[in-house]
């Protein structure tokens, strides 16, 4: 018969009375072997027995508080904790009669261990917790507990309330108490240490200005995150920029509002999340370069309409709209007008720049003068000549010109240059001249220069004209004559028909002109001298034809 430390019993040998049927026993603290029986004392003070029961020596089922058992050939004896004796079985020899036994000493009873209730605690440091165990509910029924011994995966601790370090997880801890009599009691307690999740803090919402490319480089801040049990943290940021790691990453964000999520993970694998909103705003005004100052010529009394060149405008975020005041193609008054350009970007940022429009009048009046005037005078002193000269200015309208000699003046015989000048209100002036040729009767010698070096026009209201080409030009006898036929004038010359000489276009001989006729000289180097003239009329034949020496 053998009692194992785990409270079970093994047996070998004669089993004719089933005295070895102890395989199912547990919790046994003592065994006794009788003649053909086996008795076991359980830790709870009860007794079990198997084998020969012919003397009722197995009738121990009602026994309690037994602290020791013994077995004889046909009887079983039990010692109770109070010192009295129980006995069953063969009493042929009075071996079961022990009711008057008086035991002088009470046996020591085992202490009862109490390791406290199971507990679950949060980790107080990375992956572990300091846990206080409590064995103060242990007791000894007849003495005192002298030692508390706790054992577990942490090792061994002593005392009623030791503090031990336990890792995250579930631990079974055994308390063994020993009383002053050296007996022991055992109990177990389960302590579970749980990881504490971290606390995420993605930082304060922030607004940042967009940069030159309409984006911003933004620093995120997760340093406000923590782990209550001081675990290490890893940081993962996600948003429309992608993902970033670390407590304070820098990410590139486009213009607009971005919601970014921070997830922190502690060393125990627990996570927590927080979000932060980052808004990227365009705060940069457009770049505006105005056109150079504009100078335009006045086109009417009120000024001029001016089409303004566009300024150069750009913005970091692309869009920009430009307006001007006054608008392009407005009527600008004479003088200098400030023009203000305003550029506005998509975010409403504005920039202004100015230029000037100056309307000026630098255009002189235009003079209208008569063609050269030929007047025949019966007075060798000359003749009064009346002419009309007008002038107008784009801006000022009609301008009164001044001419010298003035209209109505007596012009001397010969050619006189009349110079006319018109000045507008801005002082712009223009001058034009023309000629007045006063001729006299044919008896007068000498001649007038009409006009020198420029050619000219002679209008003969009537009469005949002979034009001779001077020596050195062609020959001394070169001439062109226009003879009155009575009803008109006929051209004759010795130059042949259709010949052009120094710009004179000669008509064929016999060409008949209707009066009046005009002969035009156009070559530049000719000097036309009227050698002699005679007043003629359609009513009579000229006896002294007018001759012009070229
Ligand atoms: Ca005790
Ligand atoms: Ca933690
Ligand atoms: Ca902008
Ligand atoms: Ca003018």
Image: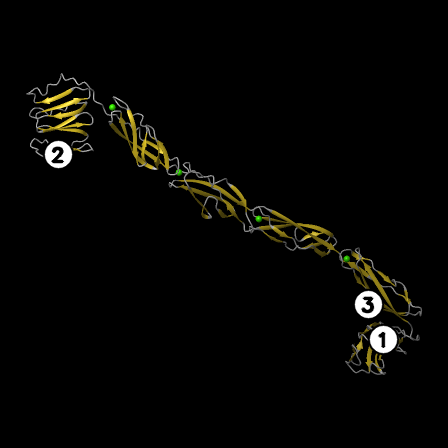
Q: Is residue 388 visible?
A: no
Q: Most extreme residue toward the front, as rendered? A: 104
Give the image quarter of residue 7: top left
| Residue occupying the point 71% across, 56% down | 295
- Front-lying residue, 294 or 137: 137
Dot 3 corresponds to which residue?
Answer: 371
Tell me the quadrant of the picture where the C terminus can be found.
bottom right
Dot 2 corresponds to which residue?
Answer: 11
Give the image quarter of residue 487: bottom right
Tell me the quadrant of the picture where the N terminus can be found.
top left
Q: Callout 2 environment at 10 Å: few (<14), some (14 to 19), or many (20+)?
A: some
Q: Callout 3 environment at 10 Å: few (<14), some (14 to 19), or many (20+)?
A: few
Q: Earlier in the sequence, mark 2 or mark 3?
A: 2
How far is the residue under mark 1 from the one under mark 2?
Answer: 173 Å
- Front-lying residue, 285 or 377: 285
How far is the residue under mark 3 from the one under mark 1?
Answer: 17 Å
Q: How far from the left and from the top, in percent, is residue 424?
A: 80, 57
Q: How far from the left and from the top, in percent, is residue 347?
A: 56, 46
Q: Which mark is residue 528?
A: 1
């Amino acid at each position: 018969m053998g009692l194992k430390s785990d409270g079970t019993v093994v047996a070998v040998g004669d089993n004719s009375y089933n005295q070895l049927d102890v395989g199912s026993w547990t919790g046994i603290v003592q065994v006794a072997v009788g003649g053909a029986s086996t008795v076991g004392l359980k830790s709870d003070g009860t007794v079990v027995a198997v084998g020969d029961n012919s003397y009722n020596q197995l009738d121990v089922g009602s026994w309690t508080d037994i602290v020791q058992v013994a077995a004889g050939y046909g009887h079983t004896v039990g010692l109770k904790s109070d010192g009295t004796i129980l006995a069953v079985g063969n009493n042929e020899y009075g071996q079961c009669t022990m009711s008057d036994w008086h035991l002088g000493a009470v046996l020591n009873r085992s202490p009862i261990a109490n390791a406290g209730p199971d507990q679950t605690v949060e980790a107080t440091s990375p992956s572990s917790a300091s846990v206080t165990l409590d064995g103060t509910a242990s007791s000894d029924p007849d003495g005192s507990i002298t030692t508390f011994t706790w054992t577990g995966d942490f090792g061994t601790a002593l005392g009623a309330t030791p503090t031990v370090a336990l890792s995250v997880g579930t631990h079974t801890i055994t308390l063994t108490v020993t009383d002053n009599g050296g007996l022991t009691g055992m109990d177990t307690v389960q302590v579970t240490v749980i990881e504490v999740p971290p606390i995420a803090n993605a930082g304060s919402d922030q607004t940042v200005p967009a940069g030159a490319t309409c984006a911003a480089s933004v620093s995120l801040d997760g340093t406000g995150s923590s782990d209550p049990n001081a675990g290490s943290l890893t940081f993962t940021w996600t948003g429309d920029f992608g993902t970033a790691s670390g407590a304070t990453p820098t990410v590139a964000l486009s213009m607009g509002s971005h919601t970014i999520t921070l997830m922190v993970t502690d060393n125990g694998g627990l996570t927590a999340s927080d979000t932060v909103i980052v808004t990227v705003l365009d705060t940069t005004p457009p770049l505006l370069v105005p056109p150079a100052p504009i100078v335009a010529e006045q086109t009417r009394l009120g000024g001029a309409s001016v089409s303004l060149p566009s300024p150069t405008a750009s913005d970091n975020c692309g869009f920009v709209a430009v307006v001007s005041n006054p608008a392009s193609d407005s009527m600008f008054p004479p003088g200098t007008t400030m023009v203000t350009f305003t550029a506005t970007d998509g975010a409403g940022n504005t920039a202004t720049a100015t230029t000037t429009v100056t309307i000026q009048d630098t255009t002189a009046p235009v003079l209208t003068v008569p063609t050269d005037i030929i007047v025949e005078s019966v007075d060798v002193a000359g003749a009064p000549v009346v002419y009309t000269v007008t002038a107008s200015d784009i801006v000022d309208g009609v301008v009164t010109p001044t001419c010298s000699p003035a209209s109505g003046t007596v012009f001397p015989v010969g050619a006189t240059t009349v110079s006319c000048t018109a000045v507008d209100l801005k002082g712009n002036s223009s001058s034009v001249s023309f000629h007045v040729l006063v001729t006299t009767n044919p008896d007068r010698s000498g001649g007038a220069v009409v006009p020198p070096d420029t050619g000219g026009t002679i209008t003969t209201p009537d009469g005949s004209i002979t034009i001779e080409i001077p020596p050195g030009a062609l020959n001394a006898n070169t001439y062109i004559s226009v003879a009155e036929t009575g009803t008109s004038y006929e051209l004759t010359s010795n130059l042949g028909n259709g010949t052009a000489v120094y710009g004179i276009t000669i008509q064929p001989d016999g060409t008949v002109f209707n009066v009046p006729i005009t002969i035009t000289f156009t070559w530049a180097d000719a000097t036309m001298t009227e050698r002699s003239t005679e007043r003629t009329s359609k009513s009579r034949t000229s006896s002294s034809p007018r001759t012009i020496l070229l």
